[in-house]
Structures are given as structure tokens and as C-alpha cells.
């Protein structure tokens, strides 16, 4: 599976995507992360598909905000470009869960040690020493703060944090549900039909969550809300969740403790 995002003329981003698709080390870390998540813990995918979904969601949010005049942190504080901010957002999205290859607990900290070396290869020779250090630190910051207990200090990090929670459509919950993990997490996730991001009014970003069952509100109210909270982007994001079926879809027949 190729890792793809809309390039939109960003030559630096195009180079990074090419290097991601040619990097066997990253592909192996994704594979190992999925072994930990799916086979050992019965969780949803945390490998290449998740990374691709997060990257595309994050890039979509970034471009909406940027087009509405909200300048990225790497531009504001370092005088770098919009294109550089997109590199930060996409690489942080691609790498944010590779620490899952080692363990789920504190995986964001484990990811930092793995990603630091990998970023050098993925950036190639497009930056000089100073710019490379800046971009690397911004990527690592976004990786570290995608976890709910960490507060992002940049626009880019806040975006990656929120995008991570948007990978919740029902197909992504199929694995834990089918192996018998029947709980509020799996049942609510099976209720999410579709998640879309578009430009909104009055807030710049509108996230739409379509549900077949009202249990899906757990995904929105408990998981997505916690990611938006303290992201630094609260004033820019509107979430609309609605049941699309006239009659709610039955997710389970019976539940016993």
C-alpha cells in the first residue's frame, strides 16, 4: 500500500512522500506496531493505514486553517514556509505511533527515540543544519503531544493530535469487535459510519461524524473531545455528530457481565 497525500504543488512534501514509500525501516516499524496493537492487544490498526488516514486528515485541517489566515507555528516563530509546515504535519502523522512496535504503554515516548533517527533519512538533503534541526524538533513535538496528557504548543502539533482521533469509522473497529471485544469502545466505534472534514462557518473547520447508532456519541464526547481539549485549536473546530439512519442499527444482540 502506497502512502499518499494530496501534494498540491509542495515539492518538499512530494520528496518526503517518495522517501516514506521507499523506506523499508519505517514499513517494518508499522508492521511491528500492528503486531502489538492487533495481534497482541486486540486493538485497531496502528500501522500504515492508520498513519495514512491521520496524515490526510491532518493535512486537510492544516490547509483549511491556513487558507483562513491561521499561520503555522513554524512560519510564525522561525520564518519558515507553509510548505515546511506541511512536511511537519505529514511526517509527524506518519511516525506518531511507531513506538507501538515496542509497547502500547508510553508509546509516544518510545516513538521519539525511534523517530529521531528516521526523520534524517526521510528529510533527505532538502535542509541545511539549522532548518533540519528546527523541522525535526517540530515533528518530535507533534509526536510527543498527540497523547491526551500532553499539551501541544504549536498549531501543527494540535492538528496532528486531533487528526489522530478522526480515524474512527466502523471498518477500523472491526478487528476488536470480531474477536469478541464487546465494550463501549468497540460498540461505539462500530456505530461510526463516516468522518469528514470540511471548511465551516463560523468556525474554520467543521468535523462531521455520521452514526448508525447513538452509542457512537462515546467516540465523539469521550475520545475526540479529549483530543480537541487543550489542543490549542478549540476555537477553530466545530464537531457535528448525527444519526443518519431513520431507525438505529442494532450493533449487538445481548451483553452479559
Image (spheres, rainbow, N blue to C red):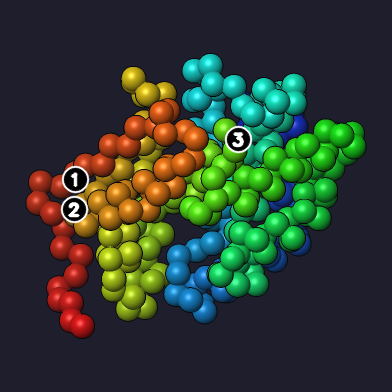
Residue 154's mark? Answer: 3
In this picture, residue 1 sits left or right of residue 196: right
Location of residue 204 with respect to 226 vertically, above or below: above
Residue matched to label 1: 243
Residue that protrudes farthest toward the left in the picture: 247
Q: Are marks 3 and 2 in contact (CB under 8 Å)?
A: no
Task: Judge depth for marks 3 and 2 and give the one in front.
Answer: 3
Give the Cα separation between the discs numbered 1 and 2: 7 Å
Q: Are marks 1 and 2 in contact (CB under 8 Å)?
A: yes
Marks 1/3: CA–CA distance: 34 Å
- The disc at residue 24 is none
In the picture provided, is 98 more to the left or to the right than 202?
right
Look at the image and tell me whether residue 212 can be seen.
yes
Q: Earlier in the sequence, mark 1 or mark 3?
A: 3
Mark 2, residues whose alpha carbon is within 10 Å: few (<14), some, or many (≥20)?
some
User: How busy is the neighbourhood of tag 1: few (under 14 within 10 Å), some, or many (20 plus)?
Assistant: many
Q: Residue at label 2? A: 214
Q: Where residue 117 sits in the image (x, y, percent)? A: 81, 55
Give the Cα distance between marks 3 and 2.
34 Å
Q: Is residue 107 above or below residue 239?
A: below
Identified at 29% across, 71% down, the residue is: 183
Amino acid at each position: 500500500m502506497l502512502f499518499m497525500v494530496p501534494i498540491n504543488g509542495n515539492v518538499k512534501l512530494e520528496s518526503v512522500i517518495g522517501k516514506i514509500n521507499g523506506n523499508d525501516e519505517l514499513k517494518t516499524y508499522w508492521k511491528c506496531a500492528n503486531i502489538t496493537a492487533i495481534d497482541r492487544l486486540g486493538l485497531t490498526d496502528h500501522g500504515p493505514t492508520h498513519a495514512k488516514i491521520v496524515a490526510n486528515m491532518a493535512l486537510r485541517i492544516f490547509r483549511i486553517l491556513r487558507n483562513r489566515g491561521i499561520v503555522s507555528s513554524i512560519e510564525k516563530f522561525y520564518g519558515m514556509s507553509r510548505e515546511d509546515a506541511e512536511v511537519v504535519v505529514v511526517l509527524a502523522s506518519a511516525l506518531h505511533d511507531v513506538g507501538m512496535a515496542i509497547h502500547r504503554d508510553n508509546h509516544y515516548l518510545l516513538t521519539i527515540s525511534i523517530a529521531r533517527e528516521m526523520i534524517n533519512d526521510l528529510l533527505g538533503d532538502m535542509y541545511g543544519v539549522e532548518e533540519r534541526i528546527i523541522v525535526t524538533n517540530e515533528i518530535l513535538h507533534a509526536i510527543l503531544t498527540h497523547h491526551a496528557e500532553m499539551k501541544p504548543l504549536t498549531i501543527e502539533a494540535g492538528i496532528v493530535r486531533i487528526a489522530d482521533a478522526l480515524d474512527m469509522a466502523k471498518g477500523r473497529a472491526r478487528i476488536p469487535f470480531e474477536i469478541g471485544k464487546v465494550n463501549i469502545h468497540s460498540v461505539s466505534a462500530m456505530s461510526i459510519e463516516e468522518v469528514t472534514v470540511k471548511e465551516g462557518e463560523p468556525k474554520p473547520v467543521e468535523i462531521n461524524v455520521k452514526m448508525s447508532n447513538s452509542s457512537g456519541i462515546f467516540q465523539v464526547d469521550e475520545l475526540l473531545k479529549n483530543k480537541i481539549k487543550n489542543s490549542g485549536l478549540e476555537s477553530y473546530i466545530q464537531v457535528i455528530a448525527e444519526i443518519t439512519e431513520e431507525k438505529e442499527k442494532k450493533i449487538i444482540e445481548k451483553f452479559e457481565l
